[in-house]
Image (tube, rainbow, N blue to C red):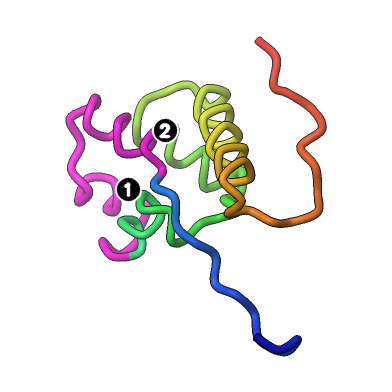
Amino acid sequence: MNGNETQKQKSHMRMYLYNIRKEKGLSIYAVIEGLALSKPYYYQIEQGIRGHKMDVLFLNDLAVIFGIDFAFLCQAELDYQKQRRNLGIRKDKRLIIYELQD
């Protein structure tokens, strides 16, 4: 790979999103309707193919649709990103400095 090519990031499934959706008894269709996303796009977020840096507004919308605490969802995403880093999938140089506190 030369310096002009960028390597695609590997996927790592966001099991926490899948598990929350199943626990709440929500179909992908219920989620995508609330988020105004296509089924393939949301599915790729759960699969870890897209959404590597989800913004706070998107996380808030997910928390509302799932009917869960926003801080819980943020912590789950932070844990997911740490897993990606520990697996060598996330290679950015920025460090996660602060932990969310209860």
Quadrant in which the C terminus appears: top right
Q: Which amino acid type corresponds to the residue marked 1 in the rendered image? A: Gly
Residue 45 in picture, x, y percent from top left: 41, 54
Q: Is residue 28 within the magenta segment?
A: yes
Relative to 91, is 11 on the left or the right? Answer: left
Q: Which amino acid type corresponds to the residue marked 2 in the rendered image? A: Val
Judge whether 22 appears above or below 36 on screen. Answer: above
* Residue 78 location, quadrant: top right
- In depth, the one of 102 and 31 nearer the eye is 102
Q: Which mark is residue 42?
A: none
Residue receiving disc 2: 64
Name which residue lies at 54% across and 65% down: 9
Residue 86 in picture, x, y percent from top left: 62, 41
Judge whether 53 appears above or below 70 on screen. Answer: below
Q: Secondary structure at mark 1?
A: helix
Name which residue lies at 39% across and 47% down: 13
Judge whether 102 appears above or below 26 on screen. Answer: above
Residue 16 in picture, x, y percent from top left: 39, 33
Tell me whether the residue at label 1 lies in contact with that at label 2, contact meaning CB atoms closer than 8 angstroms.
yes
Q: Which mark is residue 34?
A: 1
* Residue 42 location, quadrant: bottom left
How many residues crowd mark 1 within 10 Å: few (<14), some (14–19), many (20+)? few
Quadrant in which the N terminus appears: bottom right
How many residues crowd mark 2 within 10 Å: few (<14), some (14–19), many (20+)? few
Secondary structure mostly taken by the magenta-highlighted segment of the chain:
helix
Q: Which residues lie in the magenta part?
A: 14-40
Report the Cα–Cα distance between label 1 and label 2: 9 Å
